[in-house]
Image (cartoon, rainbow, N blue to C red):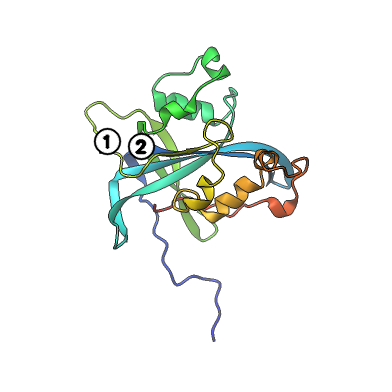
Amino acid sequence: MILSNSSSVKREIIPSGSYPARCISMIDIGTILTEYQGQKKSRTLIRLKFELPTLTKVFNPEKGEQPYVIERQFTKSLHEKSTLLPFLNNWRGKALTQDDCQAFDLSKLLGAECMLSIVHNSVGDKTYANIGGISTLPKGLECPSQFNHSFIWDYNDNYNPDAITTVNDLVPSWLQETIKSSSEWRMKNGINAETISDNDMNNDEPNDLPF
């Protein structure tokens, strides 16, 4: 019985390049404890998922060809130094005003088209596909009709605790556990939300996920 730290399963990733895409999922993860370079801090996170309808593959023979999907996680903030603000500005093709940033309804972009730039990043001996940039869809270029159903989940207008546990395709188990460790989830469910222990942290986040 020979053991190894390598996997015999080859993990395919999205080829680098630019692709028409469409936002199919928005999930408000909530406020969780994160650690970076030895420093712990609370961050309120959201996660956006996009499908790439021009790049398809048979992931499940019973379902036939399906588009690749890719996600990106952001701190839930439109501060001028945030990562999310320029991402939205590039997506919309125009900058959000200061008034917009006071109360911008992100759900209006669910189902919206865009052009995504997919880049490859290496960590150790593994290579991951990530969203490197976003822009409006160029004139004359069409994005095929949406394939997957839209999904939105938050702690206010779209709060449904059963949704994140019954739709595993949209909310995998590792993400469910991260959501359930958030302060918002705990308060909604009558759990002490004052402190979040190290055991509640979940850093095992995949990058590109075939739907």
**Residue 131, above or below 64:** above
Task: Report which residue position mark 1 lands on.
Answer: 143
| x and y percentages locating residue 89 in the rendered image | 45, 24
- Residue type for callout 1: Cys
Return the residue nearer the eye: 126 or 29: 29
Give the left or right position of residue 150, taking residue 171 as reference: left
**Left or right: 37 in relation to 147:** right
Q: Please, is residue 32 above or below residue 7 in the view? A: above
Label 1 to label 2, Cα distance in Å?
8 Å
Residue at 47%, 30% in the rendered image: 87
Q: Dividing the picture into quarters, in which one does residue 10 lie?
A: bottom left
Residue 147 image point, x, y percent? 30, 44
Kindly indicate whether the residue at mark 2 contacts the one at mark 1 (C-beta within 8 angstroms). Answer: yes
Q: Residue at x 29, y 48 (%)?
A: 55
Q: Relative to residue 203, is residue 91 drawn left or right? A: left
Can you identify the residue that label 2 sits on? 22
Circle 2 crowding by C-alpha within 10 Å: few under 14, some 14–19, many from 20: many
Residue type at mark 2? Arg
- 32 or 37: nearer the viewer: 32
